[in-house]
Image (spheres, rainbow, N blue to C red):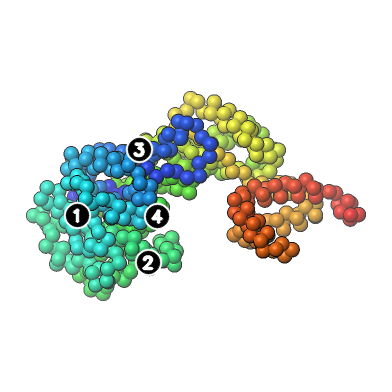
Amino acid sequence: MSYVPTRFIHAANLRLDHQPQGVATISEAAQHLLEDCTLHSFANLVQCCLDQSVDFLLLTGNTFVESDHSIRARIALIDGFQKLAAHNIQVLVIPGESDPLSAWDLQYHWPENVTFFSPGDHERFDILRETETVATLQLFGSAPAKTYQTLKLKQRNQLFNKHNQRPLSIGCMTPASSTTAEESATFELDSFSLAVPDAFQNDDDSSEVAVDYLSLPKGTSHHTFEMQPGVAHHPGTAQGLNFGEYQKNGVTLAIVNSEAPLELRRIKVAPVRWLPLELELEPHTSTAQLRQQMKSALLSRKPGKHERLWMVCWKLSGSGSLLDALEDATQQAELTSALQQELKQQQLSQLEHTFKLEFTPIQQHRESGTELTDSYLRQVESFRTRFDAPLERLISRAGHLDPQWQQRLKSIAAELDEVQIFNTAIRNGQSWLNISTDEEHHS
């Protein structure tokens, strides 16, 4: 079946002017970049719309965070929408959880190219290029199931233009219809048909066709699911705001050709990349060797077009004197300073480094350990992995403590770094219990 050619960009979770979380002490230049990163990513998105000559921009939720009360976010939106209006590019705004329709201040005179959709709206909306319908959009939310009618072929035929082409049909699931925890698990298994309500799916009547493109409200992670026919997609987030949002950041360029119905391309617009890197240290690893491993890990990543800052988190595991020394912030600073010097001639973005250390038992790197040490480390590892909150578990098992002391210790434990505590326990055990077999027999 032939389609009306069109191009559009789909973006979600822009969270304009929302600030990154979990950032340690960094340079002043990096701080400024982080504070403005979502605003820069939106400016890059607007420019991308112009460069790609799209017909419309689809924003599906969390464009800003209402509780931030950000004036800068509003100014950025107005400026960006006006630039798109100057090139006849429409903006279609679907409210999200953090930017409900009421937060958009509909009394303000937004540029004429902007259309807002109410979560209760389920009428099909025609997206026009001049006088030609290039796509249709329909919301799927919390209204009764009878409103979720898919288009009959004969109804779609009425939308054909003079070239006997039909427009792409877009469906948007609003947050009100987002899935339960059990259904979310099915999404992760790529079993999209199991998670979509029956009303979205084809029945035995072969004359019914589902939407060609279904927008999903799926948080900050990028998702694509094949449907029969069509595709369900969520672009994730344009700009990650912490180390948990480092995968597949970007916006989606959708290209519809007359014969090939849909091609999706991920476009990176983020100025800041969050980059967790894992390295394992042997007991004999030297500083020079570690620096070389870190250099290789960084150079294996290609900087994006708009990236100006890499927030790097080094997850170092293993054992040995070098790992012990890196618990000291001064040693970390000396290591990264030397690394920066070696990378000076490379075309990389500005780098900011943080460290997470995880100590593993020494006997994993040796042929044998003492029986006492082995037994102790097995118990520590078992306790650490069996429980989600091992420190709280340890406190709750302390029967000699009265309830008031238990509550005070639990509140303190919530603020402690469990990894660092277990690292210390492992090292102390290896140091204190590393006695010979003869000593074990006579103790």
Q: Which residue is mark 3?
A: 40
Q: Which residue is mark 4?
A: 219
Q: Residue at x 68, y 36 (%)?
A: 325
Residue 222 in the figure: left or right of residue 22 = left
In front here: 79 or 157?
A: 79
Q: Which of pointers 3 and 1 lies earlier in the amino acid sequence?
A: 3
Amino acid carrying label 1: it is Ala
In the rendering, which numbered label is found on residue 195? 2
SS at badge 1: strand
Amino acid carrying label 3: it is His
Q: Nearer the viewer, mark 3 or mark 2?
A: 3
In the rendering, which numbered label is found on residue 332? none
SS at badge 3: helix
Q: Quadrant of the C terminus?
A: bottom right
Amino acid carrying label 2: it is Ala
Q: Which of pointers 4 and 2 lies earlier in the amino acid sequence?
A: 2
Whether pointer 1 and pointer 2 mark residues with C-beta atoms closer than 8 Å, the reply is no
Q: Nearer the viewer, mark 3 or mark 1?
A: 3
SS at badge 2: helix
Q: CA distance from mark 4 to mark 2?
A: 16 Å
Q: Which residue is mark 1?
A: 135
Q: CA distance from mark 4 to mark 1?
A: 25 Å
Amino acid carrying label 4: it is Gly
Q: CA distance from mark 1 to mark 2?
A: 25 Å
Residue at the far front in the pictured view: 404
The answer to whether 332 is drawn above or below residue 317 in the figure is above
Q: Nearer the viewer, mark 4 or mark 1?
A: 4
**Number of residues whose C-alpha sits closer than 10 Å to that of mark 2, classed few (under 14), some (14–19) or many (20 or more):** some
